[in-house]
Structures are given as C-alpha cells and as structure tokens.
Amino acid sequence: MNRKPGDNTSPILLTDEIQSLAEELLPVTTGQGPPPRKVDEGHVIQVKHPLQGEIEGMTITLLGTDSEVFRVAMRERAGWRLKRMADGFAPESAENAETAIEEAERNLELLVNLTLGWTGFLSDGKEILCTPENVRRFYSDPGYLWLYDQVWTHLFELEYLASIPDFGSVIGQKEVVSQLCKLVELHKRANQPVPNILLVGPVESGKSTIARAFAKEVGAGLREMNGPCSRESDGLRFLTILNGKTLLIRDVGRLSSLGSDFARAIEKMEVVATVKRPSGKDGQLESAIIKMPLKRFTCIATVEGEVDCTARLRNLFPLVIRLQKYSDSELSKIIHKLAFLQGIEIEPAAANLVATVADGSVKRARLMIKRFELLSKPVVTVDDVAEVLAAFEGDVQRWVTASGASSDLASMSGVDFERLVISLFRKMGFVAEMTKASGDGGIDIEATLDKPVVGGRYLIQCKRFATDSLVGSPTVREFYGALIADRKAAKGILVTTSGYSAQAKKFAENLPIELIDGTMLAELFTQHFKEQS
C-alpha cells in the first residue's frame, strides 16, 4: 500500500490478489469515494502500523450508532448469538467449528456493511475506491488481519460498551462484586492499574459477565479472546492491538496451546517478534528481532478450576477470586430472563421449582427451559415443570428431601441413585457430572472441588445395595485399579446404600479412597438438603 507524500515509514505491500483487484476497480477519472450518507458523523478510526503502532495516514469511517443500518445490524447479530446460545451452542467455542465459521462470515459482512468510507488507501498514487468489493477483500485477506482487527476492535467497543452491565446489574455473586468494586476504587485513587485477576467458578456462574462489568468500571475498554486459540501468533496479535484495554481471556486453562511467548508477553508487557526485512542493495531478506512494549493493561481470565491452569499461567494472576454457585433465589431471576429470551413466560413458582432442580447450575436451567418448547405453551406453570421433569428426569427429585428418603433408596434405579449422589456433591460445592456408562470397576461420577488443600479431581463410584448386602474387598480393589489408571485424580470415593466388609475397610486404609456407607450418606443428605425442607 503506497503512502502519502512525506510518509517515511516502511511500506506495507499489497498482496498480489488485492493489488490486481484494486487496479481493476480503480476508476480512471476520479479517486473520490461515494458521497457521505445522511446519518450522523460516524466513527473515524486512525489506522495504525501493525508492528510500530504509528498512525499510517489512513482512516476508516464506520456508520454512526444512531443510523438505522447500524441498529438493525446489531439487533440481527445479537439475535443470532442468543438463538445459538439458547440452542446450546457457544458461538466462540473451538469445538463448534461450523458455528465459528458462520459467525466469522457474519462478522465480515457486518464490517463491510458498516464501513462508510476510507482515506489514504493508495495504489500508484491513486486512491483505492471504498466499494463493498474492495472493503471485503481487504478485511478478508490474511495479510491484512491487523486491519480487520483494528476495525473490529472499534466496532466491538461501539456494540458492547453500551450494553455491558455494570456491577449494580449483576445477579448474585455479591461478595465477588463488592471485592472488585473496592479493588478498582483503591487502584484508581493510587492511579495504578489493577493487577491481573483469575475468576474461578463453574460453567455459567457469571464469570464473563463480571469480567465485562469490571472492564466497564475500570473504563479502559475491553478486548476478548478464547483460551483455545489455534496459533500463538493469533494470541500475540491480540496483545499488540490492546492499547491499554482490559483483556478478557475465557477458559484460560486451555491457553497452554499458545506456548510460553504469550505468557511472557503478558508478564513482561512486551511482545518479541521475529520479522523478515530487506538487507543491503541486493534486497535479500534477513531475520530481525523487534521488541514491542505494550501499554500496561489488566488481564482478567476465567477458568472452571485452578487445577486446569499450568503453573506458568497461574503465576500470571496474583489475584484469584472464586465464584460461588447461584442460590435458588438468584437462579430464579436468571431463569426468568432465559425464558424471556425463548419467548416463554414462566410463573414465579415454576421458576422457583426449576431453580431448585437445577441446583445452582445455569447450564441445567437453560436445558430445562429449552425442553419447555415441547409444551407449546406461552406460560409455563408448576404442573408444566413437573410434566417435563417426569419425562426427562424421572422421579429423582422426590428423593432429594431433608430426611434423605433413605427408605426409598432400595427402589431407585442405579441411574437415579447416581443422579441423587451428583445432586448431593453439587450441594457440597463440587462441579459433578455423570460419566458415560461403564462396567463394574468403572467410574460413575467425576467431580471437581476448587478449594485450597482439599481441592482437585475426585472419582466416584456408586453402589446401590440392599442394607444387608455389604460391599466386599474385590469391589474396592477394582475401584482402586480404576483410580490408579486415571493418574489425575486426587481421591476416590465409593458411595453405597449399605455398608462395607471388614476386608474392604482394611484394604482402603492408607489409600486415597473414602468409603461412604448408608448411615453416613443419610447424614450428608440431612446436612446439605435441610434448607429445602
């Protein structure tokens, strides 16, 4: 791309594909772009050099936020994302490749439609016309990802900063919000940036929402990225365009694929890059190392458990804040919002019942609300919730009582008993999920506890036996073999409705195995479910 006269910076050359296209579309008689549209003044972006950070003498103008085109485009994009979330998809998820590709294509067309004009885009001294074809080719060309990033960052701020909730509108997590408010206030008074923060909590516990509210409170802007980034260069590119904005990294535990350079850049506030430059008159390329200092920023990251982070990543975050699962009353408010997005009205009593069944899990509540579509009813009642539960959950919830309903355990199916144990461990603060069906000796439940000293990954096996049928040592030995084969578990827990033989107890001594019998199980039910009575 040629520069204006007087620009002595190193030129960034057009790729052959864009160069030829620009020459084909360049009009002979004029270098003027289309006349301004009758909307507001728009938003002008000063294009910066991707490595040196200097202004390039080029500008890109986006449509103003008060234009109908902008408002319609934002509504359509938000509606598409909400629909994907309601359907159980995560648009940013690396696992959902098709959805990610579709979103990338939508984002590209969005930028093309919202680009009003540009200046300083020259080829052989002539200005390249700002047509949709030219704009699309520039934004989609791999050699100009830096340009796409700059424009998208600006649009991201226009779209999200106004819609990001503040701390006052966050549902639940009052202690976390209070701590962050005090932290921001303290560092603002000292005119110091807030240190990097790691938010730890179960899936959909509000980590990203709180991180965005934090960025709004800090007032430095926000840039988001996912932990499972495919290339290290992508992650480093994020850092070069931050310009002091808060960086939110979702699922930072999967950031290990980026290697150590990304972690070093955050730690040292400096990106080290190796580039090819012409040397001498012969024009041969040689490698040169460029050090790009970064404007100080705060990195706030989310993860389900600290155990998911490598030691190197963990050391990047001097401040670790743990989120708690939602209470039934907090989750009930969230359920009303989720139902509204699905076009469903849910009665307060029905929302309370869904919250009780979901046991603090937004993910489970979202799944239940999705199932309400089968009812084809505009208003969901308690009876409707009971009907859906009977179809998808069985009668598992009637076992969850203050007394533990130990007399009914014998009539439960094995799967229902496992679901009951999962509910118990969730009440105890674990993130627990049922594993795939397996034979004897297999693991029924995987549970994670994010606490110092006693935290880690736990493997659980459930045995629903008659009270007079004890669990013998062969069962415990087999379970221990599965525990050892896993290699990552901190402890194994064997849960039964009956008891254990003397030989089984003897074998489990001095091993990382805890045996929970029927009496202890009833006590745990009474202790952790008593608030529901």
Image (cartoon, rainbow, N blue to C red):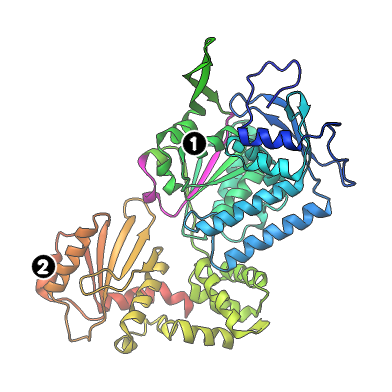
Distance CA(mark 2)–CA(mark 1): 55 Å
Name the N-terminal-most of marks 2 and 1.
Answer: 1
What range is drawn magenta here? 295-311
Residue 111, percent from left and from top: 70, 47
> Which corner quadrant of the image does residue 144 belong to?
top right
Residue occupying the point 80% across, 45% down:
63
Front-most of residues 264 and 323: 264
Residue 123, percent from left and from top: 72, 27
Q: Amino acid at mark 1?
A: Ser
Q: Which mark is residue 506?
A: 2
Q: Which residue is mark 1?
A: 233
Q: Amino acid at mark 2?
A: Lys
Residue occupying the point 52% across, 64% down:
326
Front-most of residues 52 and 475: 52
> Which corner quadrant of the image does residue 398 belong to?
bottom left
Q: Is residue 244 above or below residue 520?
A: above
Residue 319, percent from left and from top: 48, 42
For disc 1, the neighbor class at 10 Å (few under 14, some 14 to 19, many from 20) is some
